[in-house]
Structure formats: structure tokens, C-alpha cells
Image (cartoon, grey):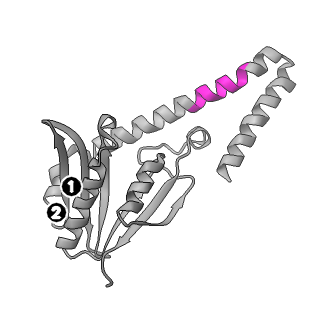
Amino acid sequence: MFITYRLFFFLISIVMCFVVTKSLALTCCAPFLLMGARYFYSHKVIHSYLACALHTDMADIEEYYMKPTGSCFWVAVLEGQVVGIVAAQGREDDNTVELRRMSVDSRFRGKGIAKLLGRRVLEFAMHNNYAAVVLGTTAVKMAAHKLYESLGFRRTGGTEDYMLPGMSRSPQERLFFQIRYQRYRLQLREE
């Protein structure tokens, strides 16, 4: 729905540009102006999200992931270099652990590092008697979704118009930036 709405908006904007200006040159520039606006707002949203992450859990990994019972944080090191991270955050209310912050340096992807990090979280969850592991992802690469499914996760839902932490929710951001959010769950045992 949102993809259609945005495409419709872009097409109408280009047509309106011609109707108002009667200039083919300006009309030809309209798609580039719209793409520039999309780039600007996408850049703004991603940097706001990163700033938000770097001022919350990633600013104090020990406080968020190492001190609380049922939570942990792992770092993958290869040849003395940090190449990946992942966190597990326990949730007592539903006896699940959330897999969070999985990331592998792009130069080291495709080497099985993410799968090892994911398995480490699953082992942690089983060792700590959690009933399930859950995760939410905005990953756009199919490889990430295939990784989760290869670890046994099943997609449980999602949204087409997810609001990243740090977004201002302005109409411009909502128009020019869209990201899908998918939720996954791996049931370890019945409650």
C-alpha cells in the first residue's frame, strides 16, 4: 500500500511539474529532485537512528547486556580484529530472550560468522532455560532473513512502515523513507 502511495505521489509530482511550469527541462529534473529528497531524508533517518543507538544500549553495553541477569553480549574476533557482534536480552515477562544488535563487518560476511553468533545466542537461551528466542529486523538483504530461517526462526509478523528509533516522524520522513520490519520467533520449548 505505501509503495503504491509513494509511487503515485512521485508520478503526480512529475506530471504536476509539467502542468504548472510547461517546461520539459524542469519536468526532467523533477525525478532527480525527488531522488535527492529521498536520499537526504534516508540519510537523516539512518544517522538519527545510529545516534540514538549510540546514546542508549550501545553507549553502555555492560549496563544493558552484561549486568542484567539473562542478558549477554558477544564479540566475534578474527585475527585480532572485531568482525561481528550480537546481544541477547532476557525478557522475564514472557520467558523469551531477544536476539539484538547482530552485525558483521561487511568485509567478513559470507564466512559463517553471523551463523556462529546466532547459534551462540540460541545456546545461551537453552542454557538459561528460556522458552523462545525472538528478534526483530529491518534487514533489507535476503541473506539476513535466510540466516534467521536457517537457524530455525519462523517469521511471525511485520510492518511495511516501521518507525526507527530516532525518527522525528515528520511527514517528509514518512514520505521519503520507508523500511520494513519483520519479527521472528524460535520456540525452544513449550511453556
Residue depicted at 78% across the width and 14% down the height: 25
Furthest residue to the front?
Answer: 111
The magenta segment? 29-38
**Viewer-proximal residue among 185 and 94:** 185
Q: Which of 124 and 168 is in front in this view?
A: 124
In the rendered image, which residue does mark 2 sit on? 68
The residue at the point 34 percent across, 36 percent down is: 106
Is residue 32 located in the magenta-colored stretch of the structure? yes
The answer to the question of whether label 1 and label 2 lie on touching residues, with beta carbons closer than 8 A, is: yes
Is residue 70 in the magenta section? no
Residue 144 point in image, percent of width and height? 41, 51
Whole-angstrom CA distance, mark 1 to mark 2, is: 7 Å
- Amino acid on which disc 1 is placed: Tyr
Main secondary structure type of the part rendered in magenta? helix
Please give the label number shown on residue 137: none
Q: Mark 1 points at which residue?
A: 64
Disc 2 packing (10 Å; few <14; some 14–19; many ≥20):
few
Image quadrant where one finds the C terminus? bottom left
The structure residue drawn at horizontal position 34% and vertical position 43%, both measured from the top left corner, is: 110
Q: Residue at x 44, y 55 (%)?
A: 145
Decide: few, some or many residues near mark 1? Use Cα within 10 Å; few <14, some 14-19, many ≥20.
some
Of helix, strand and loop, which one carries label 2?
loop
Position in image of residue 107 (x %, y %): 31, 34
